[in-house]
Image (cartoon, helix red, strand yellow):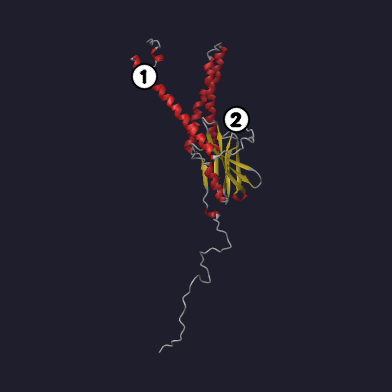
Amino acid sequence: MANSSAIEPVPEIGPSGTPPSSAQPLDQPNTASSDSVEPEDYGASTIRTTVFCLVFLLLLPFFASLPAMIGMRASAGLLGNNLGLLVLAAVFTGVMFLVFVEMMFSIRTRVHLGREKVRMTLPSGRGPTPMLRYRTYEFPYDQVQSVETRREIYGGSVVPVLMKGARVNLKDGSVVRLGYVSEANDDPVFPYVDIARKIAERARLPLIDRGSVRRSVRSKMMGIRASDHENTLVEDREIARLNASHNTFMLALIGIVLLLMLVGIAQDFADGSPVGQTAWLSALPPTVS
């Protein structure tokens, strides 16, 4: 007969004395390892760079011939005929400058988010438009003091332009301005706000939003420091009012164009002329063959 006083084993309840190998000690923070972060690169594609280079090279011979054409007309005494050519040269110069800026921006601008540090080559000129000067930055994530974004409003209530800027403040006191993107048309090649967010995540810092401020286009392009009035924060309801006034202006402009088209069509019907034939076109003399 079995001994009734034998002690049966008591089942274990709760965690055992030795924690499992997958458990993390309580005294260590739950931080992601830098080896688990994959490097990311941002830069213009080869197709985009090649297109801007080809456009610039194709336009360059025509642009280079303009001074010779203007000089030949001036030496022949055709100063009156030079007015239209001067206007064309001014417009052509602006187009060539913009194409050259975009070509250099596509060639030189690069952002590399590594596992331990950031390396990037960015335009060093101020303003939303990239200039011709570039600078290379390289800093580890542990040297980042803060990462900030801010919305800058240009223009008035008729045609407001909202730009989102981002910058990185380092512990040595230097500031790295990443760049600006338009809120109406974000650049998928260099999404500076997303780049700033990823730098903040890798540096284990929060992304700070500095709100919205007004900026003058002329002061920004000329590098003039913002005044105290421009540093005043703009509330969200003011931005909503600007967007509403812009939408109203665009609807009114479209309405005026449609009204002028309807008036022209009604006049064509009243005169018995084909629709789309304007009065100045019918008044031209016949072409001499």
Element type where label 2 sits in the image: helix
Identify the mark nearer the N-term, 1 or 2: 2
Cα distance between the residues tagged 1 and 2: 45 Å
Quadrant housing residue 238: top right
Above or below residue 2? Residue 130 is: above
Taking the image as shown, residue 49 lies to the left or right of residue 2, namely right
Residue at 54 percent of width and 25 percent of height: 93
Placement of the N terminus among the 4 image quadrants? bottom left
**Direction bottom: furthest residue:** 1
Residue that label 1 marks: 266
**Type of amino acid at the residue the image marks with label 1:** Ala
Residue that label 2 marks: 218
**Type of amino acid at the residue the image marks with label 2:** Arg
Q: Nearer the viewer, residue 37 or 172?
A: 172
Above or below residue 260? Residue 28 is: below
Tag 1 and tag 2, C-beta contact below 8 Å: no
Element type where label 1 sits in the image: helix
Provide residue 137's location: percent of width, then percent of height. Answer: 60, 43
Q: Nearer the viewer, residue 232 or 77?
A: 232
**Direction right: furthest residue:** 172
Placement of the C terminus among the 4 image quadrants? top left
Residue at 51 percent of width and 41 percent of height: 191
Provide residue 17's location: percent of width, then percent of height. Answer: 53, 72
Provide residue 279's location: percent of width, then percent of height. Answer: 40, 14
Provide residue 149's location: percent of width, then percent of height. Answer: 57, 42
